[in-house]
Image (tube, coloured by chain):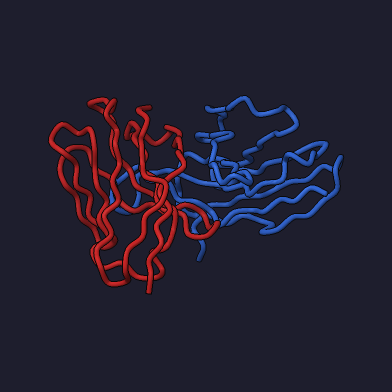
Amino acid sequence: DAKTTQPTSMDCAEGRAANLPCNHSTISGNEYVYWYRQIHSQGPQYIIHGLKNNETNEMASLIITEDRKSSTLILPHATLRDTAVYYCIVRVGDSSYKLIFGSGTRLLVRP
Amino acid sequence: DTAVSQTPKYLVTQMGNDKSIKCEQNLGHDTMYWYKQDSKKFLKIMFSYNNKELIINETVPNRFSPKSPDKAHLNLHINSLELGDSAVYFCATTGFGTGKHWGYTFGSGTRLTVV
């Protein structure tokens, strides 16, 4: 699996957009970009994924650059409950493929 | 109705004991996993089962033995527990489910403390 690079920590004000970057310069053509988050030692939670196109769901938006070497997860209106560690993972979109977690970005949402 | 449930949630035991952690999923997914999160918060895969068949075994000591009696269950038995086994163990599943993606669904974890 391609490796990812994320900032160690970030913070944003409640109600503002949180933009979390991820570099994956060695991503392969068949690898998806997945985002998960872990809120205070709970099990990681799926947020969103994409291959080439930008994606949006009820939780977040995912912007993938045209060369696919980097992406940004956007939480449009961050709340205190969004404080968590966010993991960017690239992997083949297959059911049996393992997830390789890095150290993630610790996002702190300030009141 | 919890999708992936683990029991127990907390487990405190002495070195040398044998213990089991159980995982059950009601999502109908084919693949189940055990992940370990150590004190430094790194999450690492340990095992993966697909339709009761072991498909991933990541250089885990053979004191750890997963068992899948059926597609909905994946248990983890640990023999001769050591201090270094203290961690949070997460069960997870993958399947083509909600949102039409091969996303993972994790359980809430079992915090194992060996004293």
Residue A100 lies in quadrant = top left
Residue A90 lies in quadrant = top left
A102 left or right of A62 in image: right
Position of residue A107 relative to residue B78, above or below, is below
Question: Residue B38 placed where, x, y %?
Answer: 62, 43
Residue B40 lies in quadrant = top right
The red one among the chains is: A
Question: Residue B99 placed where, x, y %?
Answer: 29, 52
- In the picture as drawn, the residue positioned furthest to the left comes out as A66
Given residues A39 and B26, the one toward you in this image is: A39
Q: Quadrant of the N terminus of chain A?
A: top left
Colour displayed for chain B in the image of the structure: blue
| Image point (42%, 46%), residue name | A8
Given residues B12 and B3, the one toward you in this image is: B12
Q: Quadrant of the C terminus of chain A?
A: bottom left
| Image point (53%, 42%), residue name | B43
Q: How many marks?
A: 0
Given residues A108 and B35, the one toward you in this image is: A108
| Image point (39%, 70%), residue name | A80
B22 left or right of B51 in image: right
Question: Residue B92 placed where, x, y %?
Answer: 51, 46
- In the picture as drawn, the residue positioned furthest to the bottom comes out as A111
Question: Residue A108 placed where, x, y %?
Answer: 41, 62
| Image point (22%, 32%), residue name | A69
